[in-house]
Image (cartoon, rainbow, N blue to C red):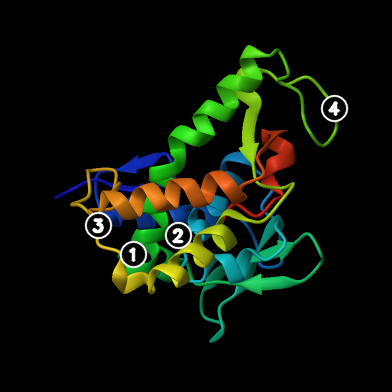
Amino acid sequence: MPEVWIGPRRYATKKARQEAVQAILGRYGLGQDVDQEDDDLLLRDLLDMHPDAAQKVGPGVDRFRIIPTPRGHHKGPEAVLVDGSKVAFSYQKCLDAPTHRQRVLAAMRTEIQPQVNAYYESRKGSHTLVSDESGQPLAPDDTHVSYFQGPRFHDIAMEFVQAAGGFDAVDLTAETARGLALFTDRTLAERWHAHHQEHAVLGLLSAKENLRRPRV
């Protein structure tokens, strides 16, 4: 059985992954904020896996709390957004097999990762590892490349996909164990690289600053 993941966390089975989420729900009472950092980070990565993640995350997640599920028999997570609005989501939907749409968006991130890495290295090489929000110096292991100064990655990607003819027009290679895939059409991939290079406005934030920003 292949390994499964939530963000960088690896699980031997789907059951073990589900139990990790259920353990978080069990640690908190109804209405209680999720205040343990590891639990908060896992729920952020989990929400990114939701089929409607971009809509759920909205302007960015401030924190999570535990609420009763619609039928009231179980606990479920709720995202409290930075604008104060609250969005409940099904953790089961997050753990379902990704749709083709989700797989394409994930592949699009993989395709442009060299651009993100190059941006980080250019900032490091020019000794400007500082937060573009607060101006505070950043340690290399506390530095996140963010889209907060311009359009979201999701919006850049959606514009490209629509121009390409929709998600069904994008074929992907077989996925690795980590679920990573690439475009089979390398000409289309190069067009995507150029589109991202033209429209992305990258910047640096600390890990804590980046937590409250949309990651999709």
- The answer to whether 197 appears left or right of 127 in the picture is left
Q: Which quadrant of the structure image shows residue 76?
A: bottom right
Which badge, 3 or 2, is on the more N-terminal residue? 2
Q: Please, what is the three-letter code of the amino acid marked with disc 2?
A: Met
| Number of on-image labels | 4
Q: CA distance from mark 1 to mark 2?
A: 8 Å
Label 3 to label 2: alpha-carbon separation: 18 Å
Residue 109 at x, y percent in the picture: 44, 48
Give above or below for 59 relative to 113.
below
User: Which residue lies under the disc numbered 2?
Assistant: 49
Residue where numbered disc 4 is placed: 135
Whether residues under marks 3 and 2 lie with C-beta atoms below 8 angstroms apart, the answer is: no
- Distance from the alpha carbon under mark 4 to that under mark 2: 31 Å
Residue at 47%, 53% in the rendered image: 23
Label 2: element kind: loop
Q: Residue 98's x, y, as percent?
A: 33, 64
Task: List the residue tagged with mark 1.
Answer: 98
